Amino acid sequence: MKRFRIIALILSLLMLMTITIGCTEKKESDNELKVEDIEQVEDIDQLEDEAVENKNFPVEVQDKFGNTEIIEEEPMTIISLAPSNTETLFALGLGDRVVGVTPFCDYPEEAQTKEKVGDYSGNNLERIIELEPDLILVYGPGDEEENRILREAGIKVLGFLSETMDDIMKDIETIGKATGRNEKAADIINSIKEKRDYILEKVKDAEEVTVFYEIWHDPLMGAGKGSFMDELITLAGGKNIAYDTDGAYPQYDLEQLIERDPQVYLASKDSEDKTIESIKLRPGYDAISAIKNDRIYLFKGNEANLVSRPGPRIGEALEVVAKAIHPELFE
């Protein structure tokens, strides 16, 4: 019924505009559109846009964990409980509808101004329910009991956890579908594919370089098989020395590291005291080729966010990794 009311209002306004424009007078000033008429045109444009958006609803959406939600109307208030989901919402042009995030949601800058309602360790359910969001995007499958409480409060809940570029693009598509931003989601996905194709073309003839990506230093943990960083390294023309380990983020001992002898050592600056020099000075590291040849790359600031978040900027992340592994190709 809401859709029909909007269409009826559009038709009424169009008729009003026709009458207003048709009733011209001899005076030159009367031949021009009045301010009120211009405002009516703008109102019509807005209503037409809303009518198009409303055609996307109701919609049935399923996340990768098998949770299905039927979203009756376009979500006007949204909460995101993971930085990658927050970035996706802003990339879709929905920043003004985000009413709650986590302390880790720091990109874009506007996200930092949003109310903090939870993080990976726990969520303020009471406050979340008070905000009356239409939709919540959680990290991974979320907490089963929390999800039950939220759904009983009438809130739609979808979970996202991407480990490959294809996963990331699928999640962007799903979030776009859930929010009525299908076309914008398709644009973002196409830009990711274009960046991936550009990098693949760049490195196609490059010599494969062995790489280790440090997730954490104490204990030493690397990006293993099944992590999206493993895929980024491969697409960027590298060979991940931790490709055959158990789990996406396995512990990796010094003996293994020296034996595999990576040519490039990648890490993110996760603390003030982590520097290229401090990595070089670690016991036993002087035996590694990457350290001997000054092939250490420390991702900082925005770059560190890029390579750690499976979100809409993943194409940029791939380029950053490719430049670290094959800098000679981008000179």
Image: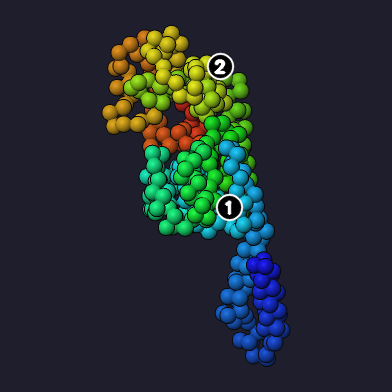
Which colour style is shown? rainbow
- Is residue 165 visible in the rendered image? The answer is yes
Q: Depth check: 65 or 274 in front? A: 65
**Which sits earlier in the primary sequence, circle 2 or circle 1?**
1
- Is residue 322 visible in the rendered image? The answer is no
Q: Which residue is mark 1?
A: 179
Q: Position of residue 273 (x, y in %)?
A: 28, 28
Question: Quick check: 118 above or below 154?
Answer: above
The mark found on residue 209 in the picture is none
Question: Quick check: 30 above or below 179?
Answer: below
Q: Which residue is mark 2?
A: 207
- Residue furthest bottom in the image: 26
Number of disc labels: 2
Identity, as a three-letter code, of the amino acid under mark 1: Thr
Question: Quick check: 301 above or below 21?
Answer: above
Q: Secondary structure at mark 2?
A: loop
x 38%, y 39%: residue: 121
Question: Quick check: 285 above or below 213?
Answer: above
x 49%, y 41%: residue: 144
Q: Position of residue 234 (x, y in %)?
A: 55, 23
